[in-house]
Image (tube, helix red, strand yellow):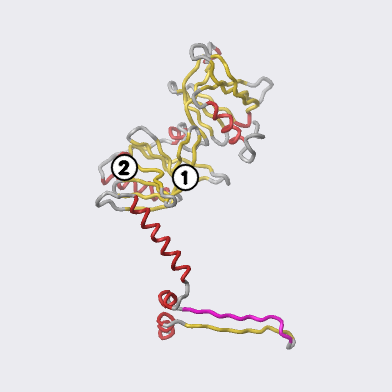
Amino acid sequence: MADLLDRVIDKGVVIKLDVIVGVAGIPLIGISLHAAVAAIETMLRHGLLEGWDTQTRANGNVEVGWREQLALEPGEQVRLELYGSYQQAEGIWRVWRPGRLMLTDQRLLLVRPLPQETLFAAEVSSIAGLGRLQKDDLTGGHHEVVCLALGDGTLAALYTPEADLLEACLRERLQRLGRTVTDLSAADLGSRGLVAAAAGQLWHRWRPGGGRAEWRSGWAVLTAGELIWQADVGPDVSLRIPLGQIRRLDLDRRGLGRPGDRDVLVLSYGTGEHPAEALFTGENVGDWPAAIRRAAHPGDGEDNARP
């Protein structure tokens, strides 16, 4: 066996086999096999696997190229590298962008090799809080998202199949840097739209206890099942509208007094004979009808999807 392996690795072995399969002396099927088995270096020396070698070297050069463009600081080393994705905000929309998640001595990065782009970058020392949330995917499964509160007040959501490993390594790096972090609650993270299809600032016409209606500033979050609105001031001032209960969804131009004429999102919802009505306005209110229709009917187009 040792001599055979030495022969295969050093010079290679060529196997040629011709087989005829017949029944009652009548040939029916012919099989002709020709195989070469050798070490990779031997194969390349004899002109075999050239296409594979060329492609492998090209991929290696690309890998080296984009790693050099990361411009790591002197002495900075990559400690952990995983597949991951980052939730990027584009207006009210929330889009997950995939890439390579890299934790160095100093930074947490998410980069896309081709075309080369840094999707997310943060100093490890700027992380002030850590938390986890459940994310629903299109197949109905659940995945955990690692959420970060940064020193500038922003929140970031990162997904990786190895969320436990990422969080453990982050906490270990923060401990080495002498930083303490706050454990973020799921309720706080969920209210900021980190696992939502859309999120943003909206004003809502709030009528407290059946009294005089007034416009209140707040934060709206659209999930796969409901539209949630929370006032900026007063945790008891909130509204939850199940998407399946929405009967009317329109964008009207209305006069709002001192602010003048504004686009107003009108939602009629409920299961009873007399549906309730909710009014919203804001800078990006025009983007919300399409977002709500898409969330309510994910398999339909925007034109024919009507709650």
Residue 99 versus residue 205 in the image, above or below: below
Instruction: Please name the residue that numbered disc 1 is placed on.
Output: 97
Cα separation between marks 1 and 2: 20 Å
Other-residue count near label 2 (Cα within 10 Å), few / some / many at <14 / 14–19 / ≥20: some
Question: Observer-nearest residue: 167 or 5?
Answer: 5
User: Left or right: 77 with respect to 193?
Assistant: left
What residue lies at 50% left-to-right and 32% top-to-bottom? 92
Circle on res. 304: none
Quarter of the image for residue 272 reads top right
**Residue 95 among magenta residues:** no
Q: Position of residue 182 (x, y in %)?
A: 34, 36
The amino acid beneath tag 1 is Arg
Badge count = 2
**Residue 32 among magenta residues:** yes
Instruction: Please name the residue that numbered disc 2 is placed on.
Output: 123
User: Left or right: 144 with respect to 124?
Assistant: right
Which tag is nearer the camera, tag 1 or tag 2? 1
The amino acid beneath tag 2 is Glu
What residue lies at 62% left-to-right and 21% top-to-bottom? 276
- Mark 1 lies on a secondary structure that is strand
- Mark 2 lies on a secondary structure that is strand
The magenta span reads 26-37
User: Nearer the N terminus, badge 1 or badge 2?
Assistant: 1
